[in-house]
Every structure is written in structure tokens, then in C-alpha cells.
């Protein structure tokens, strides 16, 4: 029997994705199939905007010194310090990768629009 290839978002920062991936795998296994999640990377499109800081606030942060807005900018700079956020995100990704390693069988290769193995259809149903 061939292995059923699960094609889904391969993102180690998203609870919904990891849960959906695990649930799909378990349902297919319950039906008697072998499964493997095909690791993929979609191309990034468009300009990525910084997370968590709306455009109007980013604009206010660029005001000249010596103004009332400078004090506001300083408060927002402290408020939106990226380091704690990035550290938390790294811990979250590490935990999701550990969950994936324990519970989700992933392919030993990665596909992308530029890299699709020729034998992918032969390996998976």
C-alpha cells in the first residue's frame, strides 16, 4: 500500500495548523492508511509588514525630537519592544517542532513551487 501524502501548511507557529495536521493524520490512520505530511514552503508574496504595530503608530514613532510626540514615541517604543515577543515566538516554535517530531510523521524532503520531486506521485496516494 502506498502512503497517503498530507499536503497542508507547514508552519511551526500556528496552533490551528498543527492540530489540523495531527487530526487529519489520525483520521487517515484510523481508516487503515499509512500517512506522511509533505513538508512544503510557499513563496512569500507581497511586502511583509511588521507584526503588532499599526501604520499610524509606526508613522508617529518617526516624529522629530523635542515634541510631545517624542514622549508618546518613547512610550510606544517601550510598549512594542520586539525582543520579548521574538523570544516568546522562538519558544513557541521550538515547542511546536517538538510536538511535530513526536506526533506527526513528516517527509524527509521539502517541496516548493521550484522543487517538486519527480517521483512524488509514485511515493504517495
Image: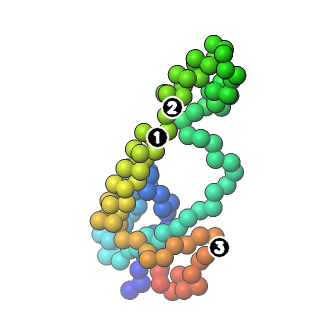
Does label 2 or label 3 sit earlier along the sequence?
Answer: 2
Callout 2 secondary element: loop
**Residue underneath mark 3:** 114
Residue identifier under label 1 = 83
In front: label 2 or label 3: 2
The residue shown at (61%, 31%) is 54
SS type, badge 1: helix
| Residue occupying the point 47% across, 80% down | 124
Residue 78 percent coordinates (x, y): 49, 27
Q: Residue at x 66, y 16 (%)?
A: 66
Q: Which residue is mark 2?
A: 80
Label 3 close to label 1 by CB (< 8 Å): no
Q: Which label's residue is closer to the chain start, 3 or 1?
A: 1
Q: Residues within 10 Å of mark 1 (few under 14, many from 20)?
A: few
Left or right of 71 in this view: 8: left
In the displayed structure, 87 sits above or below 57; it is below
Amino acid at each position: 500500500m502506498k502512503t497517503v501524502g498530507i499536503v497542508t501548511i507547514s508552519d511551526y507557529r500556528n496552533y490551528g495548523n498543527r492540530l489540523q495536521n495531527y487530526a487529519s493524520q489520525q483520521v487517515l490512520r484510523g481508516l487503515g492508511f499509512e500517512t506522511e505530511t509533505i513538508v512544503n514552503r510557499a513563496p512569500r508574496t507581497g511586502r511583509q509588514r511588521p507584526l503588532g504595530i499599526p501604520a499610524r503608530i509606526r508613522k508617529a514613532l518617526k516624529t522629530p525630537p523635542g515634541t510631545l510626540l517624542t514622549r508618546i514615541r518613547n512610550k510606544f517604543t517601550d510598549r512594542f519592544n520586539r525582543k520579548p515577543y521574538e523570544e516568546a515566538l522562538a519558544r513557541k516554535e521550538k515547542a511546536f517542532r517538538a510536538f511535530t517530531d513526536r506526533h506527526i510523521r513528516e517527509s524527509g524532503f521539502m517541496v516548493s513551487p521550484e522543487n517538486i520531486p519527480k517521483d512524488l506521485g509514485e511515493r504517495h496516494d
